């Protein structure tokens, strides 16, 4: 999928998966509508269950997925591995881990990045900006 959404006036779609509404809210509040002035606005797709994550990702309109590794019953790391195995040109995946010591597990899941709880809004924004930039064509 190319990010046609990155053209002027369009938005980037970011999927935020967690069974915990507070975690989803924390991520969205930390990033805001426009994580960086050089990027288009962000539209969030909040998801609380694994089947809906798979459905949204299969639809092919997601520029970045943020997956809570602590979600139950399906954790974000397992979902990340499945997505990377099953989706051709899978968009970038960011896994939220329970603690810094668990970030190595994100490597197993083939996630593109990991941020640990408690979430640092500055660190989260830096990682998200880096991942979203890979979805926006360079200006000519």
Image (spheres, rainbow, N blue to C red):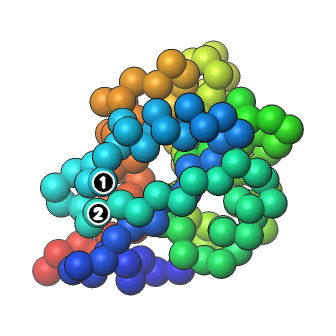
Q: Which residue is mark 1?
A: 33
The residue sitting at 14% across, 80% down in the picture is 140
* Residue at screen point 51% across, 19% down: 118
Choose between 90 and 118: the one closer to the eye.
118
Q: Residue 49, how many percent across, how many down?
A: 76, 51
Residue 106 lies, in percent from the top left, at 66, 37
Of 121 and 95, nearer the camera is 121
Rendered residue at 54%/40% (across/down): 24
Residue occupying image coordinates x 85% and y 38%? 73
The answer to whether 56 appears left or right of 118 in the picture is right
Query: Of all residues shown, which one is farthest toward the front?
Result: 21
Residue 41 numbered tag: 2
Horizontal arrangement in the rendering, residue 18 relative to residue 120 (left or right): right
Callouts 1 and 2 close, C-beta under 8 Å = yes
Q: Secondary structure at mark 1?
A: loop
Residue 86 placed where, x, y %? 78, 68
In this rendering, position of residue 47 left or right of residue 129: right
């Amino acid at each position: 999928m190319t990010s046609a959404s990155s053209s002027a006036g369009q938005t980037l779609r970011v999927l935020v998966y967690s069974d915990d509404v507070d975690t989803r809210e924390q991520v969205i509040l930390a990033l805001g509508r426009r994580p960086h002035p050089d990027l288009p606005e962000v539209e969030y797709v909040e998801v609380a269950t694994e089947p809906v994550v798979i459905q949204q990702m299969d639809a092919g309109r997601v520029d970045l997925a943020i997956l809570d590794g602590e979600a139950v019953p399906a954790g974000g790391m397992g979902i990340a591995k499945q997505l990377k195995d099953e989706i051709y040109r899978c968009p970038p995946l960011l896994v939220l881990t329970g603690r810094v010591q668990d970030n190595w597990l994100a490597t197993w899941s083939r996630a593109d990045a990991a941020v640990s709880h408690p979430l640092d809004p500055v660190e989260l924004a830096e990682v998200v900006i880096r991942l979203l930039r890979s979805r926006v064509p360079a200006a000519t």
